[in-house]
Amino acid sequence: MENTLKNFEDKMGKSCKALEEDYATIRAGRANPNILNKLMVDYYGVPTPIQSVANISVPEARIIMIAPWEKSLIKAIEKAINTSDIGINPNNDGKVIRLVFPELTEERRKELSKEVKKKGDVAKVAIRNIRRDANEAIKKMEKNGDITEDEQKEGEDKVQKLTDKYIENIDKLIENKTKEIMTV
């Protein structure tokens, strides 16, 4: 049964990790190179992550600088940025591309906070679905005679404790990201 619990705990951990990675792509007024993580550039006909074809740095709090390793990639990188949902126009000087992040308006901050909460709620639902699957697996083990009724109750208690722990983690992630967004 311990293997089963470990398996479901790993799934819960992966849900939290996925939420963290998702939050990393939400911009909060400051330049964060993680917003480029999902962008792909057409590199000789092959979709390639921007990080694989350029050096990305943050020289100032609200500027991301992208220095492609090949000058011919500037147009492809600009195109990838323009067609993405980042919402920032790239500036290039022939050698590097700069993304200048404007200050977020109060309205935009509130929209982003709602988006953060919505993504957090989706992650909580995923955790609860994992709890349901774990409880079903434990009941099945008891029904098959692999574990006793007491072990079933103990297993369900452990699953609930895991669920509470991961829901609490998600609440902290939501709170921290919302605070980051709302800080002017």
Image (tube, rainbow, N blue to C red):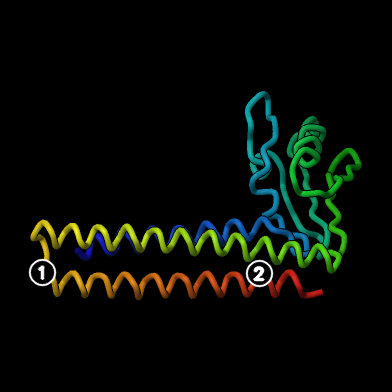
Q: Quadrant of the N terminus?
A: bottom left
Q: Quadrant of the C terminus?
A: bottom right
Camera-side residue of 67 and 122: 122
Camera-side residue of 120 and 62: 120
State left or right for residue 135 relative to residue 82: left
First of labels 2, 1 by sequence position: 1
Residue type (three-letter) at the residue carrying disc 2: Lys
Secondary structure found at label 1: loop
Residue 46 screen position, x and y as percent: 63, 27
State left or right for residue 107 relative to residue 12: right
Q: Residue at x 10, y 60 (%)?
A: 146
Q: Label 2, on which residue?
A: 177
Residue type (three-letter) at the residue carrying disc 1: Thr
Distance (Cα) linking label 2 and label 1: 43 Å
Q: Label 1, on which residue?
A: 148
Camera-side residue of 54 and 34: 34
Where residue 11 sits, quadrant-wise, is bottom left
Q: Residue at x 74, y 69 (%)?
A: 181
The vertical placement of 93 against 137, above or below, is: above
Q: Residues within 10 Å of mark 2 (few under 14, many from 20)?
A: many
